Amino acid sequence: MSEGKIMKKIIIGNWKMNPRTLKEAEKLFSAVAKSISALKKTEVVICPPTLYIEKLNKISKKIMLGAQDAFYGDVGAFTGEVSGEMLYNVGARYVILGHSERRELGENNNDINKKIKASLAAGLRPILCVGESVRDPDHGYFNFVKTQLEECLAGVNQKLFSKIIIAYEPVWAISSTPNRKDATPADSEEMVIFIRKILSLKFGKEAATVKIIYGGSVNEKDAKDFLQNGGVDGLLAGRASLDAKKFMEIIKICEALNK
Ligand code: PEP
């Protein structure tokens, strides 16, 4: 799991469709950027709504920017869509793909597979979200995640594979899920081990270099536990990333642990 000399951990903020205005977005982004000057072992990525990316990219280069989706066509008659190349050109370097909130709107593993390939070709690093909606007593959720991985990663170029980040996000733990439950670091750890096994069967040694992160209501109180005991290379925060202080706290915890 090497990345140069230091295996950096990664903290990603998914702003979803927030905040309401560019002004608020600039304020939030600047507040985070101001306090992260000394980071050496943690990479920070913020995924704001697409139309804020270009502006935010001008505020600070200390935070990498990501989109929350990218279409698989590169140019042409695709009303309403935005390509990976367009996102790259305005400053995005990452893209969340297959988020459960998009799957809920009808996106399937085949769509996500095409988006991963197109995003990689455009130079973006895909953050592929996988995760079950329920944990059934028969442990069928392992097979569910396996199918997501296999279908979303089918035919992905072996050489580009290590650019992909896998975000394990159990849907039942995400803050927007009604009657959500807390996942534990142990829940994360066992799934991370499973995911790495599936990846190594498919991609061999390269699987060891892929970052696997956890997301699902992570906050400044449980981030340390997930980073220490969840088997992960980083965290994906939704709600907590909309609060500069909380998000900064998570970043600082990560930096302090990652020695
Ligand atoms: C997400 O939906 O990607 C996420 C991590 O959200 P939250 O932290 O709000 O559960």
Image (tube, rainbow, N blue to C red):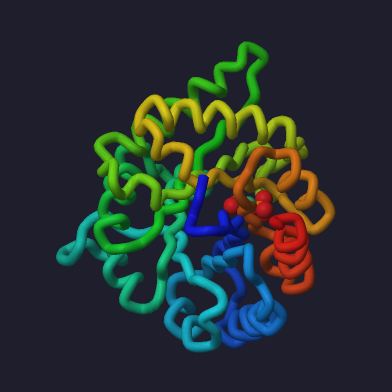
In the rendered image, the residue lying farthest to the left is 76
Q: Position of residue 225 (x, y in %)?
A: 79, 45
Give the residue displayed 71% in from the left and 58% down from the top: 254
Residue 76 versus residue 134 in the image, above or below: below
Give the residue displayed 74% in from the left and 39% down from the top: 229
Q: Position of residue 216 (x, y in %)?
A: 67, 46
Direction from residue 42 to residue 71 in the image, left or right: left
Give the residue displayed 73% in from the left and 73% down from the top: 244
Which residue is more in the foreground, 145 or 22?
A: 145
Quadrant (top left/top right/bottom left/bottom right) for the C terminus: bottom right
Direction from residue 179 to residue 124 in the image, left or right: left
Residue 54 falls in which quadrant of the image? bottom left
Residue 216 versus residue 119 in the image, above or below: above
Give the residue displayed 64% in from the left and 80% down from the top: 33
Q: Position of residue 245 (x, y in %)?
A: 78, 72
In the rendered image, the residue lying farthest to the right is 221
In the rendered image, the residue lying farthest to the front is 5
Direction from residue 50 to residue 101 in the image, left or right: right
Q: Give the tally of numbered discs.
A: 0
Which residue is more in the foreground, 24 or 152?
A: 152
Q: Position of residue 121 (x, y in %)?
A: 25, 57
Residue 12 versus residue 21 in the image, above or below: above
Residue 242 falls in which quadrant of the image? bottom right
Direction from residue 2 to residue 182 in the image, left or right: right
